[in-house]
Amino acid sequence: MSHLPQGHMRRLSWTRTNRPSQARTGDLPQALTNPSAQAHTGRPAQAHTERAPQVHANPSSQDRNHQSSRTDAPRRPPRRTFAPLLAATAALAVLLPLAACTPDPAGPAPEPADDGRPRSGTVRVLASSELADMEPLLEEARKATGITVRPTWTGTLDAVERLASGKADGAFDAVWLSSNDYLRLNPEAARRVTSETPLMTSPVALGVRPATVRRLGWDPERVSWAQVHRAVADGKLTYGMTDPKRSNSGFSALISVASGLSGAQAALTDADVRAATPKLKEFFAGQRLTSGSSGWLATAYTRRSTVDALINYESVLLSLARDTGAGTSTDPAETPADTDAESRTGRDTRTGTDLTVIRPRDGVVTADYPLSTLTDATPEAKDAVRALTEHFRSPAVQREITERTLRRPVVASARPAEPLSPEPRRELPFPGSRSVADGLLSAYEHQLRRPSRTVYVLDTSGSMKGKRLEQLKSALTGLTGDFRQREEVTLLPFGSTVKRVRTHTVDPADPAAGPAAIRADTAALTAEGNTAIYSSLAAAYDHLGPDTDSAFTSIVLMTDGENTAGRSAADFTAFYRSLPPARQITPVFPVVFGDSDRSELDRIAALTGGRLFDGTKEHGPGSLEGAFEEIRGYQ
């Protein structure tokens, strides 16, 4: 992540309060600003707000959550609202493809393959991965408006870098992130956004097992970040959190914790971060789960009954409770701390525990999920984005959003879903400069968090000769620039048996030496032998040993074929299940590559609590290089 000089940054010092009910206005289509538009639509025009991003005058100086399975959300008949919302000059261009949607007696024509190019009636959106739970609502929006949304899922901070680098130019019409706060600190990304409209909100929150709440003697309505820190520092509380460098929920949590522990009364400064560093080190020593996505983090939490809490968006925590069990507990023996207005609990049937959702009283950062139009989008695409925002901000759809996703509505006429506490909480301001935000991220990566220990189990059998081995070497070499200080990296190449195993640590006193040694070992890899997948995985667990508490441990498996030597799948399953629970918590992240058996690798991921990644494409997301980079969020 690039860093820009302090003098080039725009400071943000506001405190956002009562944001869901505040209107932000900008250039609106006539149907939304002219009262006479009601005559065309047959209903009152909805309040639609946009805000232009604040960019320095000189441009050169400036997850998937668990998808709700709820089926009883209010439903409504489809409404055709797209055409009345478009300017007259664009109406014909849009109505023609919509007319083509009329059923044909001969049957519908097959939908053309999505090649990523502009298409009439389609909006290409670069979107935060945690918004994947909105896909059913995107389909309903298509039926109601005639507009198809083509999302490309990515991490929020990765999306900002993609915009800033120009890699998104011409490929997308809009960006839909958890928050644009970080985007505004990057002048190259900010100048590519012409308007933004918040569609819903969700604050950072702490989800705690009720037994832990009782043990700590907490009143959930009065818990502060200082109390949470004290419990962690005393060894009484452990938790999981997504990776702040790759997930906006983790970044927002990092800012919330740093602000709460620094005592900052305004936007965080470098001095605030330095003052809070000792407490932050104590706080992050209690982190036991990390992840590149909120959905996987929630799944991992259900497997780890020894982890006390999760820090994530309120909607993620409430959805986890709802989607894995019954609703609010009604046990008459519960203490008031489990049933007050600030606590919302749900039964997790896989772990036999409830989840108490707490918003610390000294403040949190809130995501507002703005749908933002890109400056180089076509006029038709910009009109389509306006129509989509009007649709999603209508009271009926706002009610459906809050019921399905447990995010908070942004229009006053829509009531939040029942599990959402109505009590307000202080909104913490975002850091005022890019240097502070990036400095906080860097401190977390290299100083504050627990280090990582990863074994890369690499297929170097005979089938990897030639291009495949070169792809592997290129991907590993590119990854060395991303290794963190204090990180331990082991290369475990295998063929018929495990080959030479080499381990390197990134020493803060000489951070270049470790990556250089890894590059040298990578260059020396050769391809020969059969494919002993399961024997090599067992060797990786043996290499890591029993110490899984001092670091985030994981195993990355890359293979281009099926197991042809050594232990069988059944042998490995028996081996894994015989491990002590403390060693079983190490997940395996297999990468599908070449001719590897996807189902076999998926079973390995399911057995060990890992996740399958795709490395089958030549370049970009879905390539081996992209898979290795994506896995970084889980290490």
Image: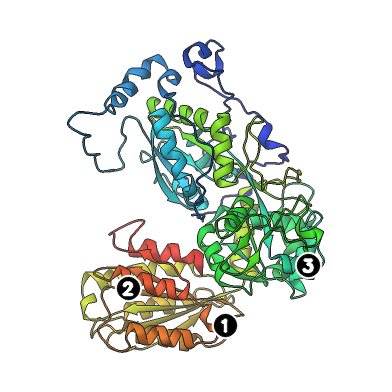
At label 1, the amino acid type is: Ala
Provide the residue designation for mark 1: 582
Mark with earlier residue (3, 1): 3
Q: Residue at x 61, y 80 (%)?
A: 549
Provide the residue designation for mark 2: 600
At label 3, the amino acid type is: Arg
Q: Residue at x 36, y 89 (%)?
A: 500
Assess disc 1: are there few (<14), some (14-19) or many (≥20) residues with their C-alpha within 10 Å of its C-alpha. few
The percent position of residue 99, horizontal first and vertical second, equals 29, 23
Q: Nearer the viewer, residue 175 or 228?
A: 228
Give the Cα separation between the discs numbered 1 and 2.
25 Å
The percent position of residue 63, horizontal first and vertical second, equals 50, 55
**Left or right of 300, for residue 231:** right
The percent position of residue 295, horizontal first and vertical second, equals 51, 58
Q: Nearer the viewer, residue 82 or 68?
A: 68
Q: Is residue 269 above or below residue 189?
A: below
Name which quarter of the figure residue 297 lies in: bottom right
Is residue 555 shown to the viewer in this render?
no
Provide the residue designation for mark 3: 214
Q: Is residue 593 above or below residue 374?
A: below
Is residue 312 shown to the viewer in this render?
yes
Mark with earlier residue (1, 2): 1
Where disc 1 sits, the SS reads: helix
Mark with earlier residue (3, 2): 3
**Left or right of 587, for residue 12:** right
